[in-house]
């Protein structure tokens, strides 16, 4: 076993040496270390008075207030220098009635700044946990699954910022319902900051859908979105957004979906196309530093009239409301959130228009037909060490984004109504305590202990489950730079 691990480490290091160069002005999403850095910046934003676009991710490295592992080094390469890094990670996961799992992964990357306004970043991972994922369909090698997690170019010139390549993002805050921060997509996005206004755009190519024999047809799929943020003053921000998921056999990107100031809904109506459009808004209000109210509403479908059977289709929307209160309970921070996504939201009768990427939700990872209350009490002992106590109560109905679109309201003999959550509801309560951070510049750790209780587990009647769990993650980080001249 040890020889096998050493062999894999040597192969990973070899690939790093051969890799094309890269570096980052922004912190890429996806790894636990980078998520920790985003959490730190999200915390700082609740106390900050400057007008930065905290509602748009990924965040910039220079927003950090300390040297967190590799990020400080990656933000300071010279124009003629390449910085490479390697992360070796061990994950211990123990649950009752399950065999304790020891999973390893390797992540390597590189960074460069060939021009003062141009940054390039990429990283590659080999992971046992991904190889063990039943939804994974790719190739495996010696028990590991490999993938390019990020590979993007970042260009900034004055008020304009462009990202091109593979990267994850979020809109409306780090806990947004729209765009999962753990789901990298291929495409591009940009934002233009003009005084109190910021205009943003995102386009991504999604996985294609093939016929069962993989020869009859291939439906292309795309996701486009634009938003407008307006800072009324130092305390209040409002954001409006619209997204569209579209595609079809041989269909390419429509030019009207490339226009950041044209209404997608109006364009769809004029073109008589059947695409899946979401609209919504989000806000944040900071009455005093350390106190914050925030929320987001997205609407998939909303019925105004009640004249036909089709008008009885249930309203489809997602809602997020939260409050952050800092320096309570002996300098601890308190966060309370409520999230609600109704059944059929993100879904549509045409499978190609569902908000999924390789069967994973593009938005909130819980999908649809659920609601949850989340209470977090956290304390930063220092910029590189975070303690968090979490309590989560969740209800999950039988609805899923990938479910067949059955339109039961069209078959109802009388007025149709649907309970929320729908069907037999799974109820869960979880309690956990987590400590994470950097022990030194080279060593990151994350340790969590907790308990989960389920009723009607997996929407099955009278199925109760208890899952005590312990997870421990250790990542060692190494980096070095060299000149290309």
Image (tube, rainbow, N blue to C red):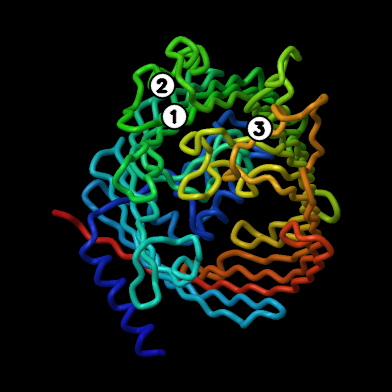
Closer to the camera in the image, 413 or 32:
413
The numbered dot on residue 246 is 1
Give the x, y percent position of residue 428: 79, 58
**Residue 484 occupies which quadrant of the picture?**
bottom left
**SS of the residue at dot 1?**
strand
* Residue drawn at 39 percent across, 55 percent down: 149
Measured in 3D between alpha carbons, the distance from the residue under mark 1 to the one under mark 2, in whole angstroms, is: 10 Å
Q: Is residue 248 toward the left or the right of residue 470 in the image?
A: left
Closer to the camera in the image, 195 or 377:
377
Residue 385 visible: yes
User: For the C terminus, which image quadrant?
Assistant: bottom left
Q: Are marks 1 and 3 in contact (CB under 8 Å)?
A: no
Q: Is residue 382 toward the left or the right of residue 193 in the image?
A: right
**Residue 161 occupies which quadrant of the picture?**
top left
Q: Are marks 1 and 2 in contact (CB under 8 Å)?
A: yes
* Residue drawn at 76 percent across, 60 percent down: 460
Residue named by callout 3: 407
* Residue drawn at 68 percent across, 31 percent down: 317
Compared with 421, 237 (above or below) is above
**SS of the residue at dot 3?**
loop
Q: Earlier in the sequence, mark 1 or mark 2?
A: 1
Residue 335 visible: no
Q: Are marks 3 and 2 in contact (CB under 8 Å)?
A: no
Residue named by callout 2: 257
Q: Nearer the viewer, mark 1 or mark 2?
A: 1
Compared with 62, 101 (above or below) is below
Give the x, y percent position of residue 96: 72, 79
């Amino acid at each position: 076993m040890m020889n096998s691990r050493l062999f894999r480490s040597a192969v990973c290091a070899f690939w790093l040496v051969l890799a094309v160069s890269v570096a980052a002005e922004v912190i890429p999403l996806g790894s636990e270390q980078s998520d920790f850095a985003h959490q730190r910046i999200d915390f700082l934003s609740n106390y900050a008075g400057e007008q930065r676009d905290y509602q748009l991710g990924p965040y910039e490295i220079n927003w950090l207030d300390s040297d967190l592992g590799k990020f400080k080094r990656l933000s300071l390469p010279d124009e003629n220098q390449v910085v490479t890094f390697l992360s070796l990670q061990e994950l211990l996961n123990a649950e009752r009635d399950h065999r304790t799992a020891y999973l390893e992964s390797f992540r390597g990357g590189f960074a460069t700044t060939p021009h003062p306004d141009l940054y390039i970043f990429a990283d590659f991972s080999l992971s046992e946990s991904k190889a063990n994922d039943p939804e994974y369909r790719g190739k495996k090698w010696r028990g590991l699954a490999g993938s390019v997690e990020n590979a993007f170019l970042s260009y900034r010139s004055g008020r304009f910022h462009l990202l091109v390549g593979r990267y994850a993002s979020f809109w409306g805050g780090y806990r947004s319902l729209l765009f999962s921060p753990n789901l990298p997509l291929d495409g591009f996005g940009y934002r233009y900051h003009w005084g109190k206004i910021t205009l943003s755009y995102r386009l991504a190519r999604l996985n294609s859908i093939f016929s069962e024999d993989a020869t009859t047809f291939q439906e292309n799929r795309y996701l486009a979105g634009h938003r407008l943020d307006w800072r009324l003053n130092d305390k209040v921000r409002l954001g409006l957004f619209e997204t569209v998921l579209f595609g079809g056999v041989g269909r390419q990107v429509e030019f009207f979906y490339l226009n950041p100031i044209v209404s997608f809904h109006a364009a769809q109506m004029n073109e008589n196309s059947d695409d899946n459009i979401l609209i919504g808004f989000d806000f944040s209000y900071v009455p005093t530093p350390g106190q914050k109210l925030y929320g987001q509403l997205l609407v998939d479908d909303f019925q105004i009239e009640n004249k036909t059977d089709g008008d009885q289709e249930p309203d489809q929307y997602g809602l997020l409301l939260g409050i952050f209160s800092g320096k309570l309970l002996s300098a601890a921070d308190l966060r309370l959130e409520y999230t609600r996504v109704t059944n059929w939201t993100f879904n549509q009768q045409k499978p190609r228009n569902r908000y999924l990427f390789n069967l994973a939700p593009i938005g909130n990872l819980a999908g649809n037909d659920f609601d949850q209350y989340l209470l977090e009490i956290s304390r930063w002992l220092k910029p590189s060490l975070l303690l968090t106590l979490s309590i989560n109560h969740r209800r999950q109905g039988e609805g899923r984004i990938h479910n067949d679109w059955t339109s039961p309201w069209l078959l109802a003999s009388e007025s149709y109504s649907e309970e929320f959550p729908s069907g037999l509801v799974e109820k869960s309560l979880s309690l956990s305590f987590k400590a994470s951070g950097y022990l030194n510049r080279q060593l990151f750790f994350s340790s969590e202990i907790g308990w989960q209780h389920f009723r009607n587990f997996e929407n099955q009647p009278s199925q109760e489950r208890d899952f005590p769990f312990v997870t421990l993650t250790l990542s060692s980080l190494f980096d070095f730079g060299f000149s290309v001249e």
